[in-house]
Image: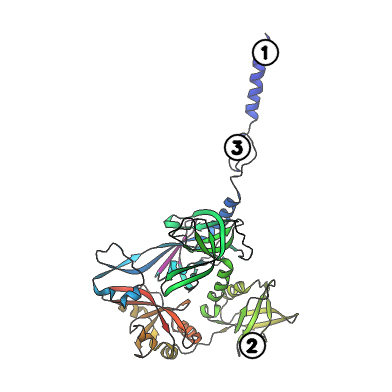
């Protein structure tokens, strides 16, 4: 009888063990037998979860031309071809939608991307990781540094990436590239930081452009990744993916975040974008200090009337600590002419408080400046004129009405009915914006001019570089 009793006892013990074993759960990476959680949810996964909501999939629409029956539809710089008599054969219009990436850097909806991603785009559509879509507007761009700023609007704040620094980058540290390579949305590649201070040269629309101080990584960066974020293992932005070497394997490049930050300070010029007049040019403070230094104060400006001096360091604005020049510029982008500011500055080690009211930027005559510096007569582009010219898809712009035959505009082939859509880093929607930009344009300075025009072959967009007189 002992053997059957033993069998029964073993059965009871096994049953009890089965009842006490918890159900399998993989939510925390654990096993079905209650073993310690695995390392599947590693730092890379955590960083991706943190950053991916701020990654933007960018689709653009732009006007391109093609030879009839030609399978190679886009052959480069349209404006250059126009003046090389490329349109000597029949042409047809086509709308193309290339894909690129970007990253949200501010909860109000500012996006950083590569300039070449949105170059000559007539419409920009942004899709986020949750599937929501927005039409974005080009705020400003810098072709030489291949960076652009877009803006999308929503009553709710957007998820955004935290900016790191490129001062403490370590060769061999893990990096993550996010974006939309080859149209595959929300893709992630990983690798290591291979090198810093790399220099490459690429063919740009205005000739060969040299990119210096780039980050090199072996994280795969394919077409469509351009403009997307390169982040460290903490999910901090350390670069903007910008180029690949097509003949090599595993070599990608990104613009380091510190260089991005310096470019953005220029691209977030609230005076140019919002026409808000403070009258103080700011700069980064000495290393290791927070705030912004006052570099110059414009005579008669709100800053001058309030008592700000060159050499002051602005520590607070409206009770908020000023971290750096970029945050200062972004804050003032939210302001309008007539708004009040309370500013706390450090002057020679002593705190001083100021109150001022922002003004509207004094606007010179756009017509006089355009004639003087560009050799072109200009006027507002009304919807009726845009319709007549077949350019109803153009958002904003200034119409060229006539040109001085000996002026810069005529020298590069411009004439009546061309529409100026951008000048230098900034898009143009009206005469006021054109005037503010022309006022800063120095004699002899070469500037990129964005254009839209129509001819017998259809509508076009392009750029030309001219020298101001």
Q: Earlier in the sequence, mark 3 or mark 2?
A: 3
The residue wearing badge 3 is 31
Percent across and percent down for residue 24 are: 59, 36
Secondary structure, magenta segment, majority class: strand
Percent across and percent down for residue 434 are: 45, 83
User: Dot 2: within a 10 Å radius of its alpha carbon, few (fewer than 14), some, or many (20 or more) residues?
Assistant: some
Q: CA distance from mark 3 to mark 2?
A: 68 Å
How is the rendered protein coloured?
rainbow
Say which element carries label 2.
helix
Q: Quadrant of the N terminus?
A: top right
User: Dot 1: within a 10 Å radius of its alpha carbon, few (fewer than 14), some, or many (20 or more) residues?
Assistant: few
Q: Which is more foreground, mark 3 or mark 1?
A: 3
Residue 150, placed above or below residue 361:
above
Say which element carries label 3.
loop
Start and end of the magenta stretch?
Answer: 123-135
Quadrant of residue 420 within the rendered picture: bottom left
The residue wearing badge 1 is 5
Quadrant of residue 401 within the rendered picture: bottom left
Percent across and percent down for residue 313 are: 68, 79
Q: CA distance from mark 3 to mark 1?
A: 34 Å
Q: Is residue 203 magenta?
A: no
């Amino acid at each position: 009888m002992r053997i059957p009793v033993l069998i029964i006892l073993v059965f009871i013990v096994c049953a009890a063990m089965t009842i006490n074993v918890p159900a399998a759960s993989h939510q925390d990476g654990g096993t079905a037998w209650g073993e310690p959680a695995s390392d599947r949810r590693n730092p890379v996964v955590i960083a991706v979860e943190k950053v991916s909501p701020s990654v933007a999939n960018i689709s653009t629409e732009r006007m391109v031309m093609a030879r009839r029956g030609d399978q190679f539809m886009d052959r480069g710089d349209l404006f250059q071809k126009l003046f090389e008599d490329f349109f000597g054969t029949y042409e047809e219009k086509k709308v193309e939608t290339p894909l690129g990436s970007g990253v949200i850097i501010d909860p109000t909806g500012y996006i950083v991307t590569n300039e070449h991603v949105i170059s000559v785009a007539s419409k920009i559509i942004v899709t986020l990781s949750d599937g929501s879509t927005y039409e974005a507007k080009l705020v400003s761009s810098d072709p030489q540094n291949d960076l652009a700023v877009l803006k999308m609007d929503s009553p709710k704040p957007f998820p955004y990436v935290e900016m790191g620094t490129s001062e403490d980058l370590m060769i061999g540290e893990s990096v993550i590239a996010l974006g939309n390579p080859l149209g595959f949305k929300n893709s992630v590649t990983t690798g290591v930081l291979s090198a810093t201070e790399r220099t490459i040269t690429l063919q740009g629309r205005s000739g060969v452009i040299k990119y210096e101080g780039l980050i090199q990584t072996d994280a795969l960066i394919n077409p469509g990744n351009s403009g997307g974020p390169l982040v460290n293992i903490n999910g901090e932005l350390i670069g903007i993916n910008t180029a690949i070497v097509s003949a090599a394997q595993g070599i990608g490049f990104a613009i380091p975040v510190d260089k991005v930050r310096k470019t953005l300070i220029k691209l977030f010029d609230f005076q140019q974008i919002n026409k808000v007049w403070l009258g103080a040019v700011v700069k980064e403070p000495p290393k290791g200090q927070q705030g912004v230094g006052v570099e110059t104060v414009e005579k008669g400006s709100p800053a001058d009337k309030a008592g700000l001096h060159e050499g002051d360091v602005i520590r607070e604005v409206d009770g908020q600590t000023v971290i750096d020049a970029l945050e200062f510029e972004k804050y003032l982008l939210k302001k309008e002419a007539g708004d009040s500011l309370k500013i706390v500055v450090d002057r020679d080690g002593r705190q001083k408080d100021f109150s001022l009211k922002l003004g509207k930027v004094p606007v010179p005559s756009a017509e006089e400046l355009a004639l003087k510096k560009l050799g072109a007569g200009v006027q507002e582009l009304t919807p009726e004129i845009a319709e007549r010219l077949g350019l109803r898809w153009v958002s904003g712009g200034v119409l060229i009405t006539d040109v001085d035959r000996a002026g810069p505009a005529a020298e590069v082939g411009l004439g009546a009915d061309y529409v100026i859509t951008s000048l230098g880093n900034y898009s143009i929607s009206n005469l006021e914006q054109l005037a503010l930009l022309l006022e800063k344009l120095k004699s002899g300075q070469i500037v990129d001019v964005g254009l839209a025009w129509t001819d017998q072959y259809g509508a076009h967009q392009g750029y030309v570089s001219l020298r101001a007189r």
